[in-house]
């Protein structure tokens, strides 16, 4: 039986919760997928919004 595994360079007990904590996953696949969708959409929005923001844009509207 395996006592531990190496996940992302860290020695972790061979336990579902411990491995998911290192991988930053939840117990529910739907939650992980929704998080990834929101993250990807935000990254894409930042890319095209950055093109719209210029030096003439008021500082309160700039990306922070």
Image: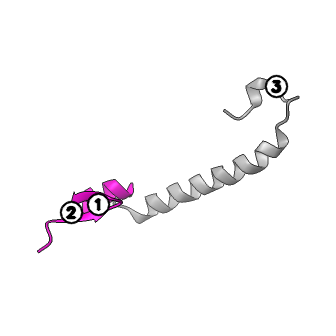
Q: Which of 10 and 56 is in front in this view?
A: 10
Residue matched to label 3: 58
Question: Which residues lie in the magenta part?
Answer: 1-24
Residues tagged 2 and 1 counted as in contact (Cβ below 8 A): yes
Residue 8 place in picture, x, y as percent: 36, 60
Q: Which residue is located at x 64 percent, y 50 percent? A: 42
Between the residue at mark 3 and the residue at mark 2, the CA separation in whole angstroms equals: 51 Å
Residue matched to label 1: 19
Q: What element carries label 1?
A: helix
Residue 63 place in picture, x, y as percent: 71, 35
Between the residue at mark 2 and the residue at mark 1, the CA separation in whole angstroms equals: 6 Å
Q: Which residue is located at x 45 percent, y 59 percent? A: 32
Give whichever of discs 3 and 1 has the lower sequence position: 1
In the rendered image, the vertical position of residue 41 relative to residue 57, given as above or below: below
Q: Is mark 3 on a helix, strand or loop?
A: loop
Image quadrant occupied by the N terminus: bottom left
């Amino acid at each position: 039986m395996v006592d531990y595994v190496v996940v992302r360079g860290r020695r972790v007990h061979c336990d579902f919760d411990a491995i998911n904590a290192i991988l930053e996953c939840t117990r529910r696949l739907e939650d992980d997928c929704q998080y990834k969708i929101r993250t990807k959409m935000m990254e894409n929005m930042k890319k095209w919004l950055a093109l719209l923001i210029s030096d003439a844009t008021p500082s309160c509207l700039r990306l922070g």
